[in-house]
Image (spheres, rainbow, N blue to C red):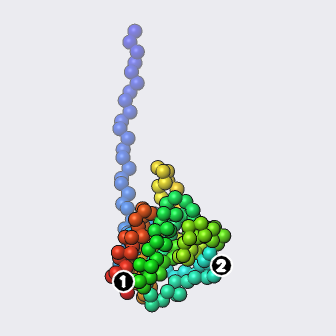
Amino acid sequence: MAQARPAKKPPAKKAPAKKAPAKSVTARSGPAKKTAKKGAAARLEPGDRAPAFSLPDQDGHNVSLEDFAGSPVVVYFYPADDTPGCTKEACQFNDNLRAFGRAGVAVVGISPDDAASHRAFRVKYRLRLPLLSDPDHDVMQRYGAWGEKTLYGRKTTGVIRSTFLLGGDGKVRQAWYGVRADGHAAKVLEETAAVD
């Protein structure tokens, strides 16, 4: 005796495709910014006004961007004191301080570390440049130097090693993101020749 086969169902009707909402476009002045990842600040580009800051240094004295008004300054963000890459970067900036000084450019480092950590780091490696503390990552976020990054193959959120060469007018002349620590200070020094 033959078994009855179940009847085939008719193919399901596809729902009509929904139209995507129109994207609103607004005009803005100044150079276009690179799109930031969700939750991260937009990256700064040459010509942008550098975000103002006032942070404590290794001795507890507040240092602000205004302190450098009229003179160019290098502001570099690094993850942590006394780690291999950060030590190499800090020592290379320190070794080039005289050359930066001859070019009329100050150098300031910023990390989440506290003043005691900065003092110990400066003493251990005889660093002469000021190190500022940004434990809440507020300034880092405004510079696009805090956000998602890949570290040893894993996604993590933290300090994005970044450097900014700012002109005496407070505008970004050059911005480097995700830099390699070794040799970076020399590259930044080369760029100072064209900065006012």
Amino acid type, callout 2: Gly
The Cα atoms of the two marked residues, 2 and 1, are separated by 30 Å
Amino acid type, callout 1: Val
Residue 107 in the image: x percent, y percent?
48, 78
Residue 106, visible in the rendered structure = yes
Residue 195, numbered label? 1
Q: Residue furthest left?
A: 194
Residue 136 in the image: x percent, y percent?
61, 70
Q: Residue at x 40, y 24 (%)?
A: 6
Above or below 108: residue 90: above
Above or below 110: residue 156: above
Residue 28 in the image: x percent, y percent?
38, 80
- In the image, 137 versus 28, the foreground residue is 137
Residue 60, numbered label? 2
Please state if 64 lies on the left or on the right of 195 as rendered: right
Q: Residue furthest bottom?
A: 70
Please state if 126 lies on the left or on the right of 190 as rendered: right
Residue 39, visible in the rendered structure = no
